[in-house]
Amino acid sequence: MKFALIGHPVSHSLSPAIHHAAYRELGLSHEYTLIDAPTQAEVDRVVAALRSGELAGANVTIPWKRQAFAVADRRSALAERLEVANVLAPLSGQIVAHNTDALALEVEFRRLLPASTPRAVVLGSGGAAPAVVAACFSAGIAEVWVTARRFDSKTPENDWPGARDLHRLGARLSRWPGTGGAEKIHFDELCRGAGLIVQCTSAGMQGADSGEPLAALVPWPLLAPDALAYDLIYAPLETPFLRVAREAGRRTEHGLSMLVGQAALAIEIWLGQRPATQPLLVAALDALAKRGRA
Ligand code: NAP
């Protein structure tokens, strides 16, 4: 059977290493390839291949997750809630869209957090933020706040990037604390006693902005003593956000477990079997190390 990841760019993806490790674990000899899709024409071709049976399943990444949701005939409840999908699965002649990004994060939060975590603070309002918010609520967190650098006082809250989706999911939005003053005081109060802080900006990722200023914004001593700092980034494995969290005595987790988790859940959707995640994590770490990016 053939599977593929479609997105742009995709050449540095760890997904082939992760999926091939899963096939080995399951004793299967399936293929997993990368399809670079700078235009929608490639997405349309993948959809046709799924309909014809040439492809048995597809993962979808930036910038096509919203399009994947739109082209599907049916959607899982979670994909419906988020209006984006990262997995397409053929089923009885139809294409079903799923969101295993949010599901994988929910699994992560349930694994790593105590049963009752009253508040989460999320940094960033890009494509990944809605999945983070949905996962927080699904994992039982009562209150979720999001802040992002373009949440400024000059722009009405409803016009902040991502505001519509984040509000719809139940998140509350707060101005970016980077300017200091009242914004920073409010942010510090949100962080006081919070059990989870999630970094979902690209700051700190290799090749992106430095993560140091963002790490310095967080009032680490105010977080709950057993708070978890979760960074969606996995290259490098320890971002400035995670380093400073660790130095402040807080628990930390990088985004590789989420990446592996969403792959394992996609495989379960396509094949009806969920591989153990540990060998997949080892394969992902190995692929990262080979690239000298770990
Ligand atoms: P995105 O749509 O490009 O959004 C990036 C966000 O980062 C935006 O809110 C952007 O703000 C903000 N940002 C960038 N530089 C910043 C800085 N210096 N200070 C403050 N904010 C900054 O990306 P995404 O899809 O949400 O992904 C976010 C990160 O999560 C990426 O590093 C991605 O690789 C990672 N990720 C990991 C997984 C996983 O499986 N582990 C899954 C998805 C994403 P503006 O809007 O102002 O530009």
Image: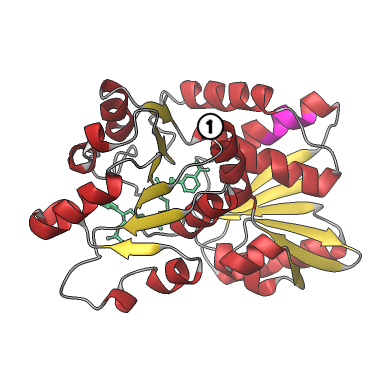
Quadrant hosting residue 90:
bottom right
Q: Which residues are magenta?
A: 19-23
Q: Tell me residue 12's x, y (percent).
A: 50, 40
Q: Is residue 276 left or right of residue 227?
A: right
Q: Amino acid at mark 1?
A: Leu
Q: Furthest residue to the left?
A: 181
Of helix, strand and loop, which mostly describes the magenta segment?
A: helix
Point 44% across, 34% down: residue: 234
Q: Judging from the image, what secondary structure is the residue with disc 1 in? A: helix
Q: Furthest residue to the right?
A: 92
Q: Is residue 139 visible?
A: yes
Q: Is residue 127 left or right of residue 280?
A: left
Q: Tell me residue 87's x, y (percent).
A: 68, 55
* Quadrant where the N terminus is found in the figure: top right
Look at the picture and state if 159 lies above or below 148. Answer: below
Badge 1 residue CB within 8 Å of ligand 1: no
**Magenta stretch: residue 22 in it?**
yes
Point 49% across, 27% down: residue: 288
Look at the picture and state if 239 lies above or below 42. Answer: above
Look at the picture and state if 221 lies above or below 80. Answer: above
Residue highlighted by disc 1? 112
Q: Is residue 266 left or right of residue 123?
A: right
Quadrant hosting residue 262:
top right
In depth, the one of 100 and 115 nearer the eye is: 115
In depth, the one of 93 and 139 nearer the eye is: 139
Point 83% across, 28% down: residue: 26
